[in-house]
Amino acid sequence: MYSMLYPRLTRLANANPHFLFNGRLLGLEREALRVAPDGYISQIPHPAALGSALTHPYITTDYSEALLEFITPPLPTPDATLQFLDEIHRAAYRQIGDELLWSASMPCILAGESSIPIAQYGRSNLGLMKHIYRRGLAWRYGRIMQVIAGIHFNFSLPDPFWALFQEQEGDRRSLQDFRSEAYFGLIRNLQRFGWLILYLFGASPAVCKSFLDGKSTTLPEFDDHTCYGPYATSLRMSNVGYTNRTEKESGVNVCYNSLSEYIASLTQATLTPWPPYEKIGVKVNGEYRQLNANILQIGNEYYASMRPKQPPIGNEKPTLALKRRGVQYVELRSVDINPLEPLGVNAPQLRFLEIFLLFCLLNESPPLDAEERRLIDDNQMAVALNGRDPALILQHRRDPPLRLRVWAEKILDQLAPISELLDSGETEPVYAAALAEQVAALADPDRTPSARMLAEMRTSGENFFRCTQRLSEQHRHYFKAQPLVEDRALFFTEAAQRSLREQQAIEAADVISFDEFLRQYFAQA
């Protein structure tokens, strides 16, 4: 299964790995609901003191006015990335009054669909498009599903690595094409082995009943207000959470076997009408309900555990950015927020993710067929719902079924030389320590975040809501107790003010109608 890993690692280890990996970049995007003191989702609009959600580089909103998204720039180390994320939290807490930042992926108390305010981005055509896209999500899937929060981990390797890796592979394509296809190999392996991330870092084994909104569930009750999975790791990534049900029902499958196939299949889904969405209507009585009636309004509607990314220029379609300039980095989207951590994530976890993504990159990664895609989906669902069950069996395309623990041990054994490679640039063996921490979590499932969260609830005698509210208050105190130093506070204040000016400039520059703006956007080819 891993025949190409060791030869590639050996060649890289003999070629100054510190130089090759030293320019890698990491980034984090952390979503966090603003929650009122009574525990319900905030009804207060996005605070103006936080800046413009349309243009602020570090603080924006996701689906809802109440769902903040904190974005770090690409940085060279886990410590630097977490330090920046910490500063964003402290900057936000300066401006949100007595509200809490919810410390879990699954949401706080919800009073039905109407209690969730859709994010607003001003009166520009661009801002209106972002709002209407979210309005379309409400019509298609409901608002409640959209306020699940997560952590996205962005990862890229530097040009010197890619140049040498291409030379060692004897590949004669352009560097851009080689890099893009190698990243797609990483993505396919992430899909194959990504169930391990759910086991190790899943942190959503329970959910407030208000999230279910009266819908039936097979989950047992923890108490009158909470449902949970006794062995669950990530209800967020299960059928309880957000999935592309329509994409599967329609028969359109986004293909990850190459960049060109990915772009073609994703584009096709954005161009294919879907009868249930046609019934909703696009523009009804002069008001847009959705951007279009196709299977996907835009490519970002497709939920995936990992996305290939290339920053668009201006209002460029993301698929065109990929087509023109290739893959610049990958975005891992399957990481739950850990309620026990103030930032929702910690440095050993980020180091393990670096090791794991390099494992996915350097291994052989054959194309995915329909049967393997089905097994991948089944494995992810099984681990999300029952990952800590010691008897859980996972399916493999080319080998007999394996117990999760056996397969995970095989994978973790392969990660040791990668951790050594990354530790060659460190003063301490921090990557080996990060790997050892996850080896211990595999040996003892009680060490996993999902098990620790349930243990916290049982020990405290609190349901999911009460326990998460208490942890959120503890984290609030942690951030408020040590405010930003003056120059960093000024940095975020100026960023907020600048973003408001940028939004005003975008609004003033509009010279065409929204209908024409939308026509031109979708006409890009």
Image: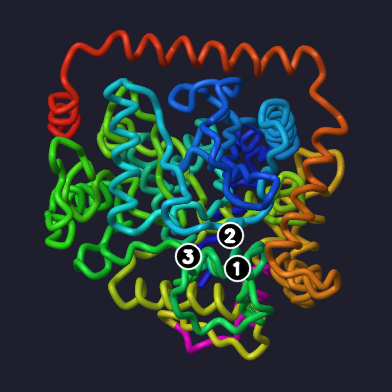
Mark toward the start of the polypeptide (2 vs 3): 2
Q: Residue at x 40, y 78 (%)?
A: 375
- Local packing at callout 2 (Cα closer than 10 Å; few below 14, some 14-19, many 20+) is many
State the SS at label 1.
strand
Residue 503, placed above or below residue 280: above
Q: CA distance from mark 3 to mark 1?
A: 10 Å
Residue 446 position within the rendered picture, expressed as x and y whole percent measured from the top left: 78, 75
- Quadrant assignment, res 225: bottom right
- Quadrant assignment, res 96: top right
Check disc 3 and give the amino acid type: Gly
**Residue 440 in view:** no
Q: CA distance from mark 2 to mark 1?
A: 6 Å
Q: As drawn, is 404 to the left or to the right of 519?
A: right
Residue 210 position within the rendered picture, expressed as x and y whole percent measured from the top left: 54, 65
Check disc 2 and give the amino acid type: Met
Q: Residue at x 23, y 44 (%)?
A: 290
Q: Give the magenta part as a residue range.
A: 399-413
Front residue of 460 and 193: 460
Residue marked by disc 1: 207
**Residue 504 in view:** yes
Residue marked by disc 2: 106
Residue marked by disc 3: 241
Q: Residue at x 65, y 77 (%)?
A: 224
Q: Are marks 2 and 1 in contact (CB under 8 Å)?
A: yes
Q: Residue at x 49, y 22 (%)?
A: 52
Mark toward the start of the polypeptide (2 vs 1): 2
Q: CA distance from mark 2 to mark 3?
A: 9 Å
Residue 512 position within the rendered picture, expressed as x and y whole percent measured from the top left: 16, 16
